[in-house]
Image: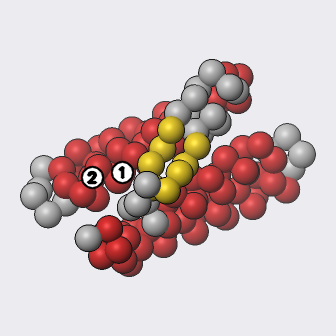
Amino acid sequence: MKTIGNFIWFITLGWILGILYFLLGVLLCVTLIGIPFGIACFRVSKLAFLPFKKSVETNYDSHPVLNVIWMVLLGAQEAVGCAIVGALLCATVIGIPFGLQLFKLMKVNALPFGCEITKE
């Protein structure tokens, strides 16, 4: 089921999100100050491509200053967007697994520094 979920996710939403986060990461890595934020975008991109069979472990105390800067600039908007679309997907029976993956992505979008993405 997880392989089918990854396939459907990648075709419908994953490739768009993954490419956008990857391109944002490349743009942020061009500047010296943006390198940590670019690396965080690459981490989010890796999860956005294929989120099934992956879990997110959070440790927000490791980089509090970077997490606050990220939350102010990008994280709040991305987290709210993931929460709204995830809630809409969970309103349908078929969309529940994909809504749950968006909630997982919401945790990484909100505060990516200190998050560790592992395979289940």
Q: Is residue 88 visible?
A: yes
* Callout 2: SS: helix
For residue 43, the mark is none
- Local packing at callout 2 (Cα closer than 10 Å; few below 14, some 14-19, many 20+) is many
Residue at 64%, 36% (x, y): give it. Answer: 113
Q: Is residue 90 above or below residue 13?
A: above
* Among the 4 quarters of the image, the one containing residue 97: bottom left
Colour scheme of the rendered structure: secondary structure
Q: As shown in the figure, which amino acid type bears the numbered disc 2?
A: Gly
Where is residue 9 drawn, in percent x and y? 35, 69
Residue at 64%, 63% (x, y): give it. Answer: 22
Residue at 32%, 68% (x, y): give it. Answer: 2
Residue at 10%, 58% (x, y): give it. Answer: 93
* Callout 1: SS: helix
Where is residue 28 drawn, in percent x and y? 76, 52
Q: Is residue 7 left or right of residue 70?
A: left
Mark 1 lies on residue: 102
Where is residue 29 drawn, in percent x and y? 81, 54
Mark 2 lies on residue: 99
Q: Is residue 75 visible?
A: no
Marks 2 and 1 in Cβ contact (< 8 Å)? yes
Q: Is residue 4 above or below residue 72?
A: below
Q: Is residue 107 left or right of residue 35?
A: left
Q: As shown in the figure, which amino acid type bears the numbered disc 1?
A: Leu
* Among the 4 quarters of the image, the one containing residue 32: top right
Image quadrant containing the N terminus = bottom left
Image quadrant containing the C terminus = bottom left
Furthest-right residue in view?
A: 32
Q: How many marks?
A: 2
> In the depicted view, which residue is nearer to us: 63 or 118?
118
